[in-house]
Image: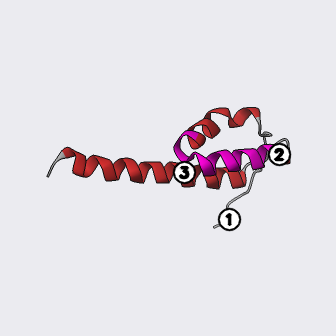
């Protein structure tokens, strides 16, 4: 068994995971404008790996910060 037999499927799996993670995060994020949300969706869909990396690097510029809400846990 060669290294490429393991490495290639691993790279594909990580790429798909990154793409799905970006799409899920995009759906949960609050953007300053609706156009930014649609633009990032198009970028992530048409260039999955590069688009997802760019999204995670630049999303702070386009999203609003939400204050964390305290939710007490009851046993």
Q: Position of residue 51 (x, y in %)?
A: 60, 41
Chief SS of the magenta region: helix
Q: CA distance from mark 3 to mark 1?
A: 35 Å
**Residue at 20% across / 45% down in the picture?**
3
**Residue at 40% across / 54% down in the picture?**
13
Mark seen at residue 74: 1
Q: CA distance from mark 1 to mark 2?
A: 40 Å
Q: Position of residue 73 (x, y in %)?
A: 67, 61
Can residue 67 be spotted in the picture?
A: no
* Magenta stretch in the rendered image: 35-50
Query: Do residues under tags 3 and 2 come within 8 Å of each other at their CB atoms?
Result: no
**Residue at 80% across / 40% down in the picture?**
64
Q: Which quarter of the figure is the C terminus placed in?
A: bottom right
Question: Quick one: 56 or 66, which is closer to the camera?
Answer: 56
Which residue lies under the disc numbered 2? Answer: 35
From what the image shows, is residue 15 above or below residue 55? below
Q: CA distance from mark 3 to mark 2?
A: 20 Å
Indicate which disc, 1 or 2, sits on the residue closer to the N terminus.
2
Indicate which disc, 3 or 1, sits on the residue closer to the N terminus.
3
Query: Do residues under tags 3 and 1 come within 8 Å of each other at their CB atoms?
Result: no
Which residue lies under the disc numbered 3? Answer: 19
Q: Position of residue 40 (x, y in %)?
A: 70, 45
Confirm whether the magenta stretch covers residue 43: yes
Which picture quadrant has residue 33? top right
């Amino acid at each position: 068994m060669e290294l490429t037999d393991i490495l290639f499927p691993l790279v594909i799996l990580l790429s798909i995971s990154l793409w799905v993670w970006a799409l899920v995060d995009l759906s949960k994020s609050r953007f300053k404008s609706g156009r930014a949300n649609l633009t990032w969706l198009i970028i992530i869909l048409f260039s999955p790996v590069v688009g997802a990396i760019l999204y995670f690097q630049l999303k702070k510029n386009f999203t609003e910060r939400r204050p964390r809400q305290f939710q007490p846990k009851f046993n």
